[in-house]
Image (tube, helix red, strand yellow):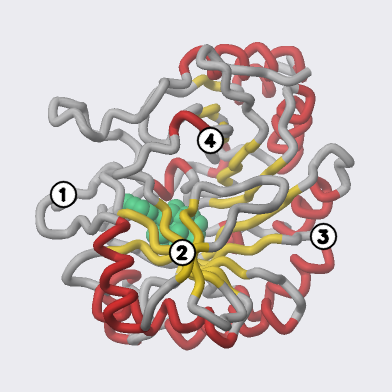
């Protein structure tokens, strides 16, 4: 059964947040100092997550990404990877991590059947890295990336949130990592998720501006033609002769809402059809009442009805989002 939403979009990609906990405090994601984690009882168990993934598969899901919070903090994550990788309908299984625990976790994840890995990396400069994430851990994250590459994860995608006056001096160096490593360095436009107070003032950089800075500091880029089973939202470029690529994720300036194929599952069991809208449908109560796949599919249908046509970031009157990224699953 291939489910479409009200606007004819086929929803084939489920992003699962396995925890709201994190070992970093990135200012754009988790700015609140006294962040109170969800009680364990409110977080879906692996069995409950698998029930939702199975229902998603019945509704047409073919691609799953595990995220958080920091997914490598959740004990037994490789077990969840293994269970999802074993589902024959799932053609693509990825995980997004901040990389802090990757050096030791890369092998168990690989062995469990993970094929795609995204690692967040906002700067190569240890002081800037610490300013962004709250941790002096740039070297540890780089060691994790190298471990993943040596185990054959290819490409590893590196995500950099572009923030003016914070990490823009490092865009060229980050992009040049794609010369010698089979990595896709992707610059993400800074989004106004909950708790982000200075967005759109001095901090926001459009993808065109980021590309100008990269080309000024690191050389001209050429466009890469789109290919692959699941073309992503990034605009793809590369330096001539490079092993990897440079991409731009234009979440704010160029809506890719028209082609959005995503559903999100939050750590506390809500289906969230749009990252940038607080509309959600609970699945946890139905699961815990033993109502099974039918209840999840009914919730899935309701969530599809709630999926907006596009985000409302251009509307200055829009209400601020209630959940921060670490609570949604970016
Ligand atoms: N902890 C993992 C990590 O950092 O990769 C996974 C979860 S994190 C919420 C997923 C992605 O969301 C990261 O690449 C992060 O940089 C991005 N992100 C978080 N807040 C953002 C914001 N306000 N604007 C743009 N991207 C953001
Ligand atoms: Fe944690 Fe990832 Fe959010 Fe940073 S972006 S605070 S690493 S969840």
- Distance of mark 3 from mark 2, alpha carbons? 24 Å
Identify which residue is drawn at 43% across, 44% down.
327
Q: Which residue lies furthest to the left in this view?
A: 201
Task: Name the element at disc 2.
Answer: strand
3D distance between C-alphas at marks 1 and 3:
40 Å
Check the image and report above or below for 94 versus 314: below
Badge 4: residue crowd in 10 Å (few <14, some 14–19, many ≥20): many
Q: Mark 1 points at which residue?
A: 200
In terms of secondary structure, where does tag 3 sit? loop
Give the camera-side residue of 256 and 109: 256
Report, in whole angstroms, how far the alpha carbon at label 1 lies from the one at label 4. 30 Å
- Residue 95: image location, x then y, percent: 63, 57
Q: In this view, does 293 lie above or below 329?
A: above
Q: Is label 2 or label 4 in front?
A: 2
Q: What is the number of the mark on residue 113?
A: 3
Q: Which residue position holds label 4?
A: 268
- Helix, strand or loop status at disc 1: loop
- How far, Cα to Cα, is label 4 from label 3? 25 Å
- Which of the labelled discs sits on residue 186, or is there none? 2
Mark 2–mark 4 distance (CA, rounded to whole Å): 29 Å
Give whichever of discs 2 and 1 has the lower sequence position: 2
């Amino acid at each position: 059964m291939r489910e479409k939403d009200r606007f004819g979009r086929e929803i084939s990609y489920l992003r699962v947040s396995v925890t709201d906990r994190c070992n970093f405090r990135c200012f754009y994601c988790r700015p609140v100092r006294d962040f109170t984690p969800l009680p364990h009882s409110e977080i879906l168990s692996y069995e409950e997550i698998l029930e939702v993934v199975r229902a998603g598969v019945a509704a047409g899901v073919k691609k799953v990404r595990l995220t958080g919070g920091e997914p490598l903090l959740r004990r037994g994550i490789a077990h969840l990877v293994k269970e999802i990788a074993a589902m024959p309908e799932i053609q693509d299984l990825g995980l997004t991590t901040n990389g802090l625990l990757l050096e030791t976790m890369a092998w168990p994840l690989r062995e469990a059947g993970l094929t795609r890995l995204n690692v967040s990396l906002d700067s190569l400069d240890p002081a800037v890295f610490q300013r962004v994430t709250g941790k002096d851990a740039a070297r540890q994250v780089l060691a994790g990336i190298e471990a993943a590459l040596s185990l054959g994860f290819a490409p590893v995608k590196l995500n950099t949130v572009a923030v003016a006056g914070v990490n823009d001096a490092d865009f060229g160096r980050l992009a040049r990592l794609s010369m010698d490593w089979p990595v896709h360095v992707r610059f993400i436009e800074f989004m106004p998720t909950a708790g982000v107070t200075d967005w759109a003032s001095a901090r926001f950089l459009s993808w065109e501006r980021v590309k100008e800075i990269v080309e000024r500091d690191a050389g001209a880029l050429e466009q890469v033609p789109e290919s692959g089973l699941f073309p992503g939202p990034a605009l793809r470029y590369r330096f001539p002769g490079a092993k990897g690529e440079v991409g731009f994720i234009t979440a704010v300036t160029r809506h890719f809402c028209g082609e959005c194929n995503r559903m999100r599952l939050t750590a506390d069991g809500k289906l969230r059809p749009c990252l940038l809208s607080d509309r959600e449908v609970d699945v946890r109560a139905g699961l815990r009442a033993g109502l099974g796949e039918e209840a999840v599919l009914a919730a899935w249908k309701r969530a599809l009805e709630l999926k907006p046509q596009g985000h409302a970031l251009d509307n200055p009157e829009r209400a601020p989002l209630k959940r921060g990224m670490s609570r949604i699953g970016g």
